[in-house]
Every structure is written in C-alpha cells, then in structure tokens.
Image (tube, helix red, strand yellow):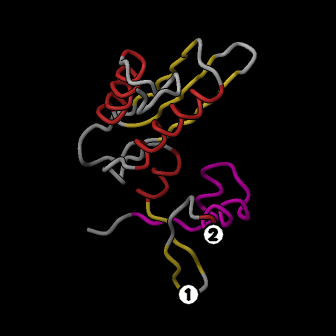
Amino acid sequence: MSEEMFSVEQVAERLGLHVRTVRGYIRAGRLRAVRIGKQYRIARADLDALTGRPAPAGGAAVEVSSILQIDGVDRAAADRLATLVLATANTNHQPAHPLRIQTVHDEERNRMKIVILGGASATADVLRLVDAVLDGDNGLLTGEVGGA
C-alpha cells in the first residue's frame, strides 16, 4: 500500500504558507521530506505530525499539558529543581513521544512555574518526582543535600 505524498507547493497551499517557509521547515528538520531528484515529497503522516494531527493508525495518542506553580522557592532552589526535572525529561524512554518541560522563576514573588507537555505516564512520573521533592525532607530545596 503506497502512502499519499505531497509536493512542497501542495503543502504550502494546504497550510497557507509560502513555499520558502515549507522548504525552511524541511531544512530545519521540522518537516520530514524525501528528496526525489530536485523535488521534495512529503508523506501525509509527516504533514500530520507537523500540524499536530493524530496518526490514523496505532490507537489514540494522549498528550497532557500541566502547569505547576510553586511558591516560596528562591533562585538557588529553583535552579536545583529545574535541573532535576529537566534531567528527568532528558532520560524519557519514549523518543516517539518526547517530554517537553520549561521552567521559569519569578524572583520578586519567590515563585517557580514548571510547564510540562507529554504523554500521560511520563507527565505523571514528573509530577510524582516534584511531589516527592517538595514533600520530602531531602534538603534539595534548602540546599542542605548530604548535610549533617
């Protein structure tokens, strides 16, 4: 069974973009394409992946978005927590469904926000980790790790 393929011009028309923009997406790796001679061809699945449409086969895909707000966190503690959470995201074992995390610290309010986008189980793992760090008496947020 052959998959439906589109030219750069067809993709640009479908998305309402300029042809140069689509070629830029291909060169940057945002849109997968196959080069046939001097022309690019884009598979429907790759176009769907770019636009965020779910793949038709393989069951339902679930993506969770979460925003955590943590009050009473100074800059040093926020840096330690961000390092821990980002390390967790980098060791995610599902390359087809990457876990995306961003952290922001507001020094005026001593507040940290963590934005998580990913699969349900990977997001739950990060939430459990943050809960354990915040509820535990491990010294991560106070800077007393390995203390007396």
Residue drawn at the location 71% of the way across and 59% of the way down: 21
Residue reaching furthest front? 148
Residue 116 in the image, given as x and y percentages of width and height: 48, 31
Main structural element of the magenta stretch: helix, strand or loop?
Answer: helix
In the rendered structure, find residue 37 and report the number of the disc placed on it: 1
Residue 34 lies, with reference to residue 60, above or below; the image says below
Task: From the viewer's side, name the closer residue of 94 and 44.
Answer: 94
Image check: 124 left or right of 48?
left
Residue 71 in the image, given as x and y percentages of width and height: 58, 12
SS label for mark 2:
helix
Residue drawn at the location 51% of the way across and 69% of the way down: 33
Task: From the viewer's side, name the closer residue of 27 and 140.
Answer: 140
Image check: 20 left or right of 111?
right
Residue drawn at the location 52% of the way across and 40% of the way down: 83
Q: Amino acid at mark 2?
A: Arg
Q: Amino acid at mark 1?
A: Gly
SS label for mark 1:
loop
- Circle 1 or circle 2, nearest the eye: 2
Residue 62 lies, with reference to residue 50, above or below; the image says above
How would you rate the neighbour count of disc 1 (Cα within 10 Å): few for under 14, some for 14-19, many for 20 or more?
A: few
Question: What span is colored magenta in the figure?
Answer: 4-27
Residue drawn at the location 63% of the way across and 69% of the way down: 27
Q: Is residue 15 magenta?
A: yes
Query: Do the residues under discs 1 and 2 have CB atoms within 8 angstroms?
Result: no
Q: Tell me the distance, in whole angstroms, between the alpha carbons under discs 1 and 2.
A: 16 Å
Mark found first going from the N terminus, 1 or 2: 2
Residue 32 in the image, given as x and y percentages of width and height: 50, 65
- Please give the residue where the numbered disc 2 appears in the rendered image: 27
Image check: 106 left or right of 88?
right
In the rendered structure, find residue 26 and report the number of the disc placed on it: none
Quarter of the picture containing the N terminus is bottom left
Q: Is residue 122 magenta?
A: no
